[in-house]
């Protein structure tokens, strides 16, 4: 039995082709059954010579090892991000932009704010402009609530600013002191 090859493409990266046949399935299963014992000798607790006492090895971060540097310029509003709605003819336009460098961190919260505005309208079809983190999280929440969503974008990942973004999430505890 031969399963079809699967092609995967990610933006400008070269296509990857994997062929999964009965032979590779049997070999994979055999390795899974016997692999634990066979690979046990590969594990070592020895520390490299350059490891500090009790710590991890020193990482070489010299400039000649840098592969690429990227920067993402993010639209910023000095008054803060905007989530709001307005009527234009028979359409409702919901704005969700201006997060500056905090888009990943704020994305689910402001997407929920935009969703709440959308749920107050009779419309159940939405056009999302942009496929950065804000557009994608907003589109996802709209879909989860039954909206028919179309995304329109000038660029797709990995060519969006959000593709070079970082986010900060943390566990917090709010107590009233009792």
Image (cartoon, helix red, strand yellow):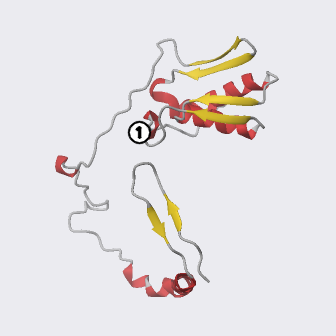
- Number of numbered callouts drawn: 1
Q: Position of residue 140 (x, y in %)?
A: 66, 39
Name the residue carrying label 1. Answer: 164
Q: Position of residue 99 (x, y in %)?
A: 51, 24
User: Which residue occupies the foreground of this view, 101 or 4?
Assistant: 4
- Left or right, residue 63 beside residue 152: left
Q: Residue at x 28, y 69 (%)?
A: 47
- Left or right, residue 64 beside residue 30: left
User: Which residue occupies the foreground of this view, 19 or 77?
Assistant: 19
Q: Position of residue 171 (x, y in %)?
A: 58, 40
**Observer able to see residue 110:** yes
Q: Residue at x 62, y 30 (%)?
A: 128
- Quadrant that contains the C terminus: top right
- Left or right, residue 8 beside residue 178: left
**Observer able to see residue 176:** no
Is residue 48 positioned above or below 150 on the image? below
Q: Residues within 10 Å of mark 1 (few under 14, many from 20)?
A: few
Q: Quadrant of residue 39?
A: bottom left
Q: Quadrant of residue 33?
A: bottom right
Q: Position of residue 42 (x, y in %)?
A: 38, 80
Q: Quadrant of residue 96?
A: top right
Q: Residue at x 31, y 62 (%)?
A: 54
- Quadrant that contains the N terminus: bottom right
Q: Residue at x 26, y 49 (%)?
A: 67
| SS type, badge 1 | helix
């Amino acid at each position: 039995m031969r399963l079809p090859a699967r092609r995967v493409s990610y933006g400008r990266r070269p296509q990857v082709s994997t062929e999964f046949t009965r032979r590779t399935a049997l070999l994979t299963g055999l390795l899974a059954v016997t692999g634990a014992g066979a690979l046990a000798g590969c594990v070592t607790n020895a520390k490299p010579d350059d490891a500090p006492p009790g710590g991890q090895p020193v990482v070489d971060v010299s400039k000649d090892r840098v592969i690429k540097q990227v920067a993402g310029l993010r639209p910023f509003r000095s008054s803060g991000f905007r989530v709001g709605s307005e009527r234009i003819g028979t359409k409702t336009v919901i704005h969700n932009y201006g997060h500056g460098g905090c888009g990943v961190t704020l994305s689910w919260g402001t997407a929920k704010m935009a969703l709440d505005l959308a749920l107050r309208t009779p419309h159940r079809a939405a056009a999302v402009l942009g496929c950065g983190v804000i557009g994608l999280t907003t589109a996802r929440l709209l879909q989860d609530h039954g909206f028919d969503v179309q995304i329109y974008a000038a660029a797709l990942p990995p060519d969006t600013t959000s593709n070079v973004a970082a986010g900060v999430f943390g566990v917090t505890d709010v107590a009233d002191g009792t």
